[in-house]
Structures are given as C-alpha cells and as structure tokens.
Image (tube, rainbow, N blue to C red):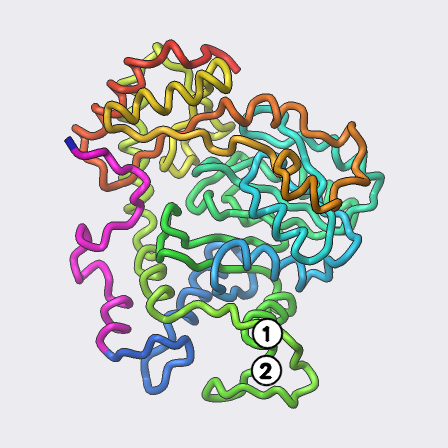
Amino acid sequence: MAVVNPHQFFELPSESPDTLPYFHAVLGDGQLFRYVEGDRESANTALERHFADYFGKEAAVAVANGTVGLRLALQAAGVGPGDRVLVSAYSFIACAMAVAAVGAVPVPMDMDTPLTVDTTAFKAAGGAVAAVMVVHVQGHAVPAGRLRELCDALGVPLIEDVCQGVGAASPDGRAGRLADIAVTSFQQSKQIASGEGGLVAGGAELIERVYRLSDLGAVRHGGGLPDWDDERAVLADNLRLTELQAALALDQALALGDTLARQRANRARLREALGSAVTVLHSEHPAGDAGSHTLLMARTASDAQRFCAAVQAENVVARVVWKKTFREYGVFRRSGLTDELSSQQWPKTAVALGPRILSVPVSKYVPESGVARVAEAVLNHRHHLAREW
C-alpha cells in the first residue's frame, strides 16, 4: 500500500493544462530567463505584482528562495554586523541563519503558547534591537499585533516570515500584512510550490534595494538592460528566480482560494474523525488557518518520535515540526554569535515544547479515503499524545 503523501502541495500530473496557463506560456516560447523579450509579460513581474497586492505592500521582488529573501530583507533594511535581531525561537534554523549571514546576532523570542510569541525578549534587549522577525508556523498565523505595536514604539522594522503561512490569518489579520517586510517561500513543501523560490514584499525603496541585491547589483533600464555605471549600482550576487519557477508559482497563487478551501475541508474531516479523543493545538483563529497541517502535542519528546514511527508504519506521515531551537544547534554554539546572550534569553518554553509538537499535513490532493486513513493511524497511537500542553 502506497504511503499517503500529504506533503505534496503541488502535483503537476494532477493539474490540467487549463489550470497552468502561465507555466505553459513559458514552456511555449522557451524563455526561461526573467527578462523576457517580446510581448509576453514576465511571469516574475506578474508574480511580484500579485504578491505586493496580496500582502498589502507597495512592491515585491521574486528571489531564489525564502532564506535568501530573509537575508536580503535584513540587508536592505540596514541590518548588519553587531546588530541584534529578535527571532521567533520556535522556527526553522534558516530564520536565524539569515540573521547570522548579515553578521547580526539572532536573539530568540520564546513562546507564550505553542502558537503565540512571548514579547519578554523586547524588555530583555533593552531597546538595542535592529529588527524583529516573527515566523508563522505550518499554515497557522501567529498574531502579530503586539509585535507591530512594540516595533512602532522602538522604531524598528517588523519582518514576517510567511514561508509556511501563505493563506493563513490570525485575529490581527492576514499573515504578512502588518509587517514592514513580508517574506515567503515557494519551496516544494509550501502551499505554493515551484521546487525552490521566494519573494520579498515591502515599501518601494526597500524593494528596489532588494531587487538590486538579488540582481548582481545592476540598475535595470528599458528592455531590462543592466547598468553597472549608474551610481545606484552595488556589488551583489545573482539570486534571481527563473521564469519557469515564477510561472508555476503564479498559476498556483491565482488558484490559492481553491487550494485553501480544499485543504480546510480535508482538515475539517480529519478533526471530525479524531473527535474528542485527540487534542489538537488550535490557533487563536482556527477559521483563518490555511488548513495545510494539523498540530498535535506528544506527551514527551520520546513519545513524539515513537508516534511518528508508528504512523509511518501505517503509511501515514507525521513529523516533529522543529526538534530544536536554533541556539541548541552546534553550528550556532560554535559560531560565537550567541555568546553575549544571557541565560535569561534562552527560550525555555520553546526548548521544552518544540520536540513535542507534531505536524500532520493533509494537502488538497489527499482524497477522503486518505484522510480517513490518517485519522485511523492517529487514533491507533493516541496513547503517545498529550491531552493538554
């Protein structure tokens, strides 16, 4: 019996040509570079316009991946060596890596609950903060209102990592809209998937800087020709997105409403099947969740591993979202970047809860029978799960 693959958020064989017009247009004319010749509008340009509007920002630029997007956002915002950046402790290591890549120090923000952020780190930092990065988790939007207010009081930018949160909303609104800079990803396991890829949205001046930093520092004139003699040109890297990736992402972005509806329907079926026998970690606004993942809490870290192995044996996927906070990885301990942080800045709740939080993904492609199999496997091994966190 084949493994249910709910992580597959995009399956080309499952889509008809009619649902992928931009993708087939690029295949048709063979222009894979983002600077298109002729009458066809660049898929990159259309994708950027779409997400600038989606996140409520002045402009956007497509880049090679989400991690690159975070790094370029920080760099364009003026964050550099020695600066401190508050980062959600409960997040993928790439978030802190992006901070370290510009020479800044990632300072962890702990968890209030499994899906909210503790703002104590603001006080501990004593105002010496250059930016704040909040990370949305597995299709659940973290309420960003408190962070927005604190950033305004400090006069520092709020960056929302929406790589896992496209389509999600909290009581404070859609993920990414309160941020000065919103960053998302199109990596294979994301809601919108083109294998790799990412996007940064924000103010026009900041996005122009990101654009140059991702495009060999060039200033582009009419026809897309680069000018490195212009005084605005900078030394930079090539971190562009291809036309094929942009087209694939754009087609899915335009169909996001249908994707969310199908995912939410599957999640509703799963929760109904689980009933009261299993405690699900709810966000503050369950109706706003993207529906891509259902989060559970294991009794212990060991139970989390046993649960994942047990349901895998029944051809169902469940995973610990993030086993460690970034400070616990040897690569950060060896870097010396966090040496100056006090013991009070260790994310105690995230360290304790992180290895116990489980994610059960169910994409729009999973049929009702597949959802029933997932529910059955979860129920069969619920003795590993906590009734409360």
Task: Decide which of 64, 78 is in the foreground and name it.
Answer: 64
Is 26 part of what is drawn in magenta? yes
From the viewer's perspective, is residue 105 above or below residue 124?
A: below
From the viewer's perspective, is residue 283 above or below residue 213?
A: above
Image location of residue 154, percent across then percent down: 79, 46
Q: Residue at x 32, y 55 (%)?
A: 252
Residue flagged by tag 2: what amino acid is it? Val
Question: Dot 1: what SS?
Answer: helix
Task: Decide which of 203, 215 is in the foreground and name it.
Answer: 215
User: Which quadrant is home to the N terminus?
Assistant: top left
Residue flagged by tag 1: what amino acid is it? Arg
Disc 2, disc 1: CB below 8 Å?
Answer: yes
Residue 41: quarter of image: bottom left
Residue 249 is labelled as none
Residue 349: quarter of image: top right
Q: Residue at x 23, y 34 (%)?
A: 4
Q: Which residue was labeled with disc 1?
A: 212
Q: Is residue 269 left or right of residue 193?
A: left
Q: Residue at x 43, y 59 (%)?
A: 197
Mark 2 burial class by Cα count in 10 Å: few <14, some 14-19, many 20+? many
Image location of residue 258, percent across then percent down: 28, 46
From the viewer's perspective, is residue 136 above or below residue 51?
A: above
Give the spatial CA distance, label 2 vs label 1. 7 Å
Question: Dot 2: what SS?
Answer: strand
Q: Is residue 9 left or right of residue 210?
A: left
Precedes in sequence: disc 2 or disc 1: 1
Q: Residue at x 16, y 57 (%)?
A: 16
Image location of residue 256, percent across then percent down: 34, 50
Residue 229: quarter of image: bottom right
Q: Which residue was labeled with disc 2?
A: 219
State the extent of the magenta-drawn residues as a range.
Answer: 2-28
Mark 1 burial class by Cα count in 10 Å: few <14, some 14-19, many 20+? many
